[in-house]
Image (tube, grey):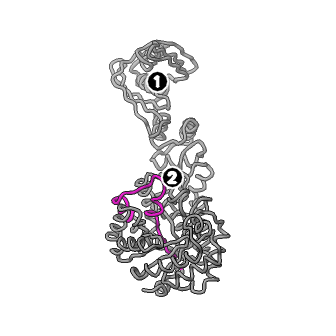
Amino acid sequence: MNNGAIRNNINNDKIIIFDTTLRDGEQSPGASLNIKEKLQIAEQLAKLNVDVIEAGFPVASKGDFEAVRKVAQEIEGPVIAGLARSTKGDIERAWEAVQYAKRPRIHTFIATSDIHMKYKLKKERPEVLDMAREAVSFAVSLCPDVEFSAEDAFRSDREFLCQVIELAIDAGAGTINIPDTVGYAIPSEFGALIKLICEKVPNVSRAILSCHCHNDLGLGVANSLAAIQNGVLQVECTMNGLGERAGNAALEEVVMSIKTREDLFHKHTGIITQEIYKTSKMVSHLTGMMVQRNKAIVGENAFAHESGIHQDGVLKEKTTYEIMTPESIGLKQSRLVLGKHSGRHAFSNRLSEMGYTLSSENLDKAFQRFKELADKKKEVFDEELQAIVEDEIYAVPENFVLDYIHITSGNKTIPTATVILKRNSEILMDSACGDGPVDAAYKTIDRLTGMPGSLQSYSINAVAGGKDAMGEVIIKVKIGERTFTGRGISTDVIVASAKAYLNAINKAVYRNEGKGKG
């Protein structure tokens, strides 16, 4: 198939997604992948339905060659490409690796900017033209699908760049890639470059124009979208924006921008967007490159809302604050993060989802307790909400209320507790020593309530994850002839322990199984 036939088979309304996670993405410092991991990611990229997988740079190492060959042998669906410099040895090695694919591609490149030609290649323009022509011609003799990249195209002399592109197309390249190799372009400039190429290269209609934008100024995606608006039909990108230095244009951002703003671009991709989140998580896990929380599309906060105003809006109508659905990228639903900025609407809605129906009075009490907790920690989890409701709303009447507790403890200090309790309008205060801070607290409470208990069991658990999680203390206390279960919740385990003990004592008072002091 010649380059004209390749170009004529392309739907001008579809943007080809060329994924280079396994090549350029793997070049991120610390992101090296073994053959098994590359194959695992390639299988997921095929499920994502990318059009092209650039599986690696076969001449770079024996491992890279084997990985590209393995992907070519086992992955069906996408075109499998191997990168090669404009040398016969590189191109032969690339072909040796990709030849097993049902749809192989050789992707060859040479630098075209004056700075690269002078300092890296140490060659003059005529030599570069000859190398580009020879490389593409040789690649075409091996493989029907050849892509040519003019490295550092954006910083290249425009007239020379157009000359190289025309030559490469004449030599048989079916795809011409225009890289912003160092992420120097501004979207208006990059769009203008693509437009100029479309106008000045006489045979450009015989090839597919592609872009490969780096993110050094944070504009990789923006430049790619500007390129689409000016004639590019292939975008080279990586999952999670991995790549050299600050990375490449992020596949998920490019794809969801086109999908969300189809009214503007009038284009579409073949990506199965519901596989995006799964792919992102896999790439992050296997490369060890974590995704920042506020990363667009796939970050942990991308579909999370904490502000009370935002939560209220989303609960009434999701489109108030969500321009795409979480389901569209493979998430089950949005996440309303309950924290100090959350409002009553989101709090009430979450309790309802958890199966709690509270009166207005009890909801006020629970919300006040929630706000107090939210001021102490970043996020309040469902388990903590459950504990609040059960601790505050469904508790027995509090005959004794913990007002103050102070503990002195250490490996060379006698543990001592000072406790203040409230009983109606009465204030009770005392101190006692014990074998550890909890024992000291319990002995002090015994003296204050006049209802000494015998501790039968004691357990403590983190209600949710994180260092700032609430501690839940559950105890069994024998008071008189009966045993009562006490439960206490707090971010301070000593406070939680004291609350649990008082909870058991209050149950004893409530059931008239003992006599309170006074």
Nearest the eye: 26 or 305: 26
Front-lying residue, 469 or 198: 198
Q: Which mark is residue 300?
A: 2
Image quadrant containing the N terminus: bottom left
10 Å neighbourhood of mark 2: few (<14), some, or many (≥20)?
Answer: some
Determine whether 320 is above or below 356 in the image. below
**Are the residues tagged 1 and 2 within 8 Å (C-beta)?**
no
Nearest the viewer among 94 and 251 is 94
Residue 281 x/y as whole percent = 43, 56
Q: Does the segment drawn in magenta span residue 40?
A: yes
Which disc, if any, is residue 498? Answer: 1
| Label 1 vs 2, first from the N-terminus | 2
Secondary structure, mark 1, is helix
Q: Is residue 462 above or below residue 438?
A: below
Q: Give yes or no for residue 412 being in the magenta stretch.
A: no
**Which amino acid is tagged 1?**
Ala
Amino acid found under the numbered disc labelled 2:
Glu
Q: Is residue 267 visible?
A: no
x and y, in percent, of residue 402 in the image: 52, 23
The alpha-carbon separation of the residues under discs 1 and 2 comes to: 37 Å
Residue 279 badge: none
Magenta residue span: 13-42
Give the residue displayed 56% in from the left and 63% down from the top.
214
Kindly indicate the quadrant of the structure image that contains residue 371: top right
Q: Position of residue 468 (x, y in %)?
A: 50, 36
Q: Residues within 10 Å of mark 1 (few under 14, many from 20)?
A: many
The answer to whether one can see residue 282 in this image is yes
Q: What kind of element bears circle 2?
A: loop
How far across and how far down the image is residue 174, in percent?
49, 81
Which label sits in the foreground, 1 or 2?
Answer: 2
